[in-house]
Amino acid sequence: MKKIGIYVHVPFCVRKCFYCDFLSFPAGEKERERYVSGLLREINKESARYGKYEVESVFLGGGTPTVLSGGQIGRIMDGLRAGFSFGEEAEITIEANPGTVDIEKLESCRRAGINRISIGAQSLDDGELALLGRVHSAKDFLEAYGLAGKAGFRNVNVDIMAALPGQNPESYLNGLKRVIDLGPAHISAYSLMVEEGTPFYEWYGEDGKRKDGIVTHLPSALPSALPTEEEEREMYERTGEILEAGGYYRYEISNYARPGYECRHNIRYWRRGDYAGFGLGASSMVENVRWKNSADMGNYLCCMEEGSGDIKEERCVLSIGDQMEEFMFLGLRMSEGVGKKDFYNAFGKSLEDVYGEIIEKLCAQGLLTDGDSVRLTPYGRDISNYVMAEFLQ
């Protein structure tokens, strides 16, 4: 039986963070309930297409899925299990933000079969959290982490961010060490990205300097600039060193795990496995056909409630060239890189025949290593966007 991953998008949050460009927004109880009902209709309608698949992983993401009630989360899981065949060892993850969980909700998630939780700490400094627009404190995070363990979660990820306004390597690494001391199974450590359409972009733009005299509603405590490239690089390099010393290994550019606790759902993305997305704006890729659900809530709910209309958009059948490009730039995110046998088995061509000149060039620049697999060097990781762009034909 073929394997598949499932992504379920919950677009709701308590308040939009200042750096966030994800499809998310606050909503009241009635809108949340209406959405869950629509989501269950979509799952019920579409699940018949996947009779030949066994679910290997589920990821409830957002937004903040734990804005929903424990009962609503349980109904979503019941709907998935009614429509799909689940593997016995399926990894089932829910994203959670501190302040949106209590012991009852977490225990409800465990009863629903959720066995992995990803907690968005982002920082353990209350000043940094306020500048990010987060609705929780460091204390709230520590309480949520403790409750997750009490509820029976053993596979816990913690998200932490670097290169925040006013942050320096010392303050960031102090927070990272506090997270390590908690002993989570997995840590996602990534740098702040200033995205267009967010308050951060309005305040800092692309150059990372505060827009004094241009933007009139700047927060009074907003630092004058983001950390420098040198400071950000130091944070990144020291992250790997400290996590390795703490028993974690980097298996992807920004993800670290204790052995056996790598996120199987995300690895599916990076290895171009099949996945089906449900909910507002959710993306899918099944047998090299990619599509995306409508990101318009009115349209999504109307189609689900009336039982007519199509929420699928941007459908694209990937060419062999498209598949090869994705195989490279997604696979290079992984520390083990792109295996030459894997490439040949997928496409019937050797990696050298397709990308030999590019690989030779990047190896000469000290960005890749070439053996049984092609991997990023530490320098290549620093400028990974450049390296991966080289494989776009």
Image: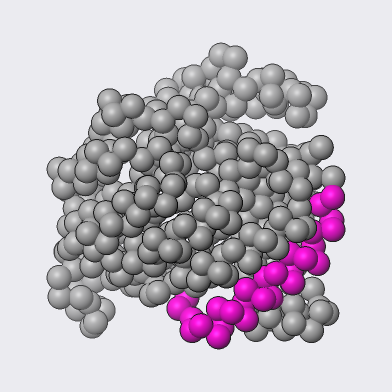
How many labels were placed on the picture? 0
In this view, 83 is above or below 268: below
Q: Residue 42: within the magenta?
A: yes
Q: Nearer the viewer, residue 27 or 284?
A: 27
The answer, for residue 226, to whether it is visible in the render is: no
In this view, 245 is above or below 85: above
Residue located 51% across and 67% down the image: 70
Q: Residue 130: within the magenta?
A: no
In the rendering, at what x and y percent does residue 386 appear?
47, 40
Q: Nearer the viewer, residue 278 or 89?
A: 89
Q: Give the quarter of the image for residue 298.
A: bottom right
In the rendering, at what x and y percent does residue 194 appear?
37, 60
Q: Which stretch appears magenta?
A: 25-51
The answer, for residue 154, to whether it is visible in the render is: yes
Q: Give the quarter of the image for residue 341.
A: top right
In this view, 318 is above or below 220: above
Residue located 55% across and 51% down the image: 114
